[in-house]
Amino acid sequence: MKMDAITATPLLRVDRLTKRYGPRIGCANVSFDLWPGEVLGIVGESGSGKSTLLSCLAGHLTPDEGQVIFDTAQGPRDVLRMTEPERRRLSRTHWAFVHQNPRDGLRMGVTAGGNVGERLMAIGARHYGGIRDKATDWLGRVEIAAERIDDRPSAFSGGMQQRLQIARNLVTGPRLVFMDEPTGGLDVSVQARLLDLLRGLVREMGLSAIIVTHDLAVVRLLADRLMVMKSGHVVEQGLTDQVLDDPQHPYTQLLVSSVLQV
Amino acid sequence: MTDYNFAYLDEQTKRMIRRAILKGVAVPGYQVPFASREMPMPYGWGTGGVQVTAACLTPDDRLKVIDQGADDTTNAVSIRKFFQRTAGVAVTEATADATVIQTRHRIPEHPLTEGQILVYQVPIPEPLRFLEPRETETRKMHSLEEYGLMHVKLYEDIARHGSIATSYAYPVKVEGRYVMDPSPIPKFDNPKLSDNPALQLFGAGREQRIYALPPYTHVVSLDFDDHPFQASKAPHDCDLCGAPDSYLDEVITDDAGSRMFVCSDTDFCRSRREAGHAGRLTMQEAAE
């Protein structure tokens, strides 16, 4: 974490966020602060509401109650009260969303270069050579060979697609990245490389990130802080190592003890 | 003809279409939905254009219909006949004499003047359609002016072909606001869209959309700073009239590889020949 920028306001402040699906609870009363440069992990079993929470934060779902206050250039603003154009502009520039399935986050019919360049063009880049240089640079940073720039993502392996999705999201230099199971569906060696890459990028760019996963190894490597969710509620939160090494809540104890040891 | 109302459509339908046209004129480049009617011709034959023309025609109008620039092809002939039968209006092949021109895929070479109406037949009005299949999403993109995706298409062209290979239906931006599909006219015609003294109306029957460019609207073809827009045509002169600056059709004349290039605008070519201009083939013929 960078210590030179001492800031008084958190990058994202979430206050009593609640989302119900009819009588059922998606997530309830979730509050936390995310500070600049911090990586927050959200873990829990399937159906615990972690993806619902992430969708609410990223503006894909509208929560029923609560506030999501983001520290914009014009000062802290409640994202949920923003007009749609404002929110979409925010999610194109200062935010990024990495989907679990790269097919959801990529345009499969468009070349790798076009995929990376889309966000640049969306914010007004109109110089082909410049866009291409930047795309080449970013493909290099996610370890995709520069000569694959004119190939479509459908010709890429799963791991490459996921790395391409990350490049596409980070090219505009966002401040906050939402990741939904970024390593899901990848085999372990590819997962390890991807995690290594992500860790490097997050540290290097001073990104803040919220990572949803059910894989405790992922949060151990990436996250500074950890939130454990069960049935829509946050049951425990704290520093990652602290939560994983000394779990307090019975559910967290169960979760930690059920990790397979090789 | 007493069996039909003037110009085929009933007056309430015309009123509905005129309201859509007026809205389109008020918001240049914006696609106005309208309740497209069944017309006595198949979709793709210009049902949208025919409805717009029918709503614009008055008994004093003189109508010209062209298909790919030609006055004598099936589509043009049948639509012209349709309005002769159902509206009894005068028809012409001369661009300068016409008050209403319905066109498929071309803008006439002869400059248009104030008071003329150019009606385009449009197959797919949505310029973003092949990039974003969801109508809800494309509408949102138009309303929020999110047009980055349009440049992704042009980027892909350059990445694959080395230059912007889109040669027809080339996307344009209208008055700095809406991105519009100019219907499948060749990009050679794109510069004529801008600052044109005539009223330009676009009708898409199957897709139920009308849009418009009022006279003297500023229209810009999209491009990149380092790959600027170029209005392209075949690098030849017309073989019949010798015109160096008109859009050309390439016609294969035998199975031994001979070909000729002729103006796609038949009226323009004929009037030039009548004025004494000659191209490669006409001169050869005269010499024989």
Image (spheres, coloured by chain):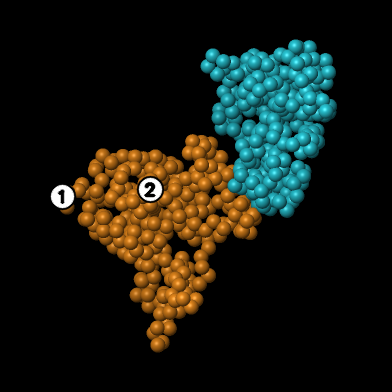
- Callout 1: SS: loop
- Callout 2: SS: strand
Which residue occupies the foreground of this view, A246 or B282? A246
* Labels 1 and 2 share a subunit: yes
Residue position for label 2: B203
- Res. B252 in view: yes
The colour assigned to chain B within the rendered structure: orange
Question: What is the spatial separation of the Cα atoms under label 1 and label 2, in whole angstroms?
Answer: 27 Å
Name the image quarter holding residue A225: top right
Residue at screen point 54% across, 14% down: A23
Residue at screen point 33% across, 51% down: B42
Say which mark, if any, is on residue B2.
1
Identity of the amino acid at label 2? Gly
Whether B103 is drawn above or below A229: the answer is: below
**Image mark 2: chain:** B
**Image mark 1: chain:** B
The image position of residue B81, as x and y in percent, is: 26, 58
Residue extending farthest bottom: B288
Badge 1: residue crowd in 10 Å (few <14, some 14–19, many ≥20): few
**Mark 1 or 2 closer to N-term?**
1
- Res. A9 in view: no
Whether B190 is drawn above or below A256: the answer is: below
Say which mark, if any, is on residue B163.
none
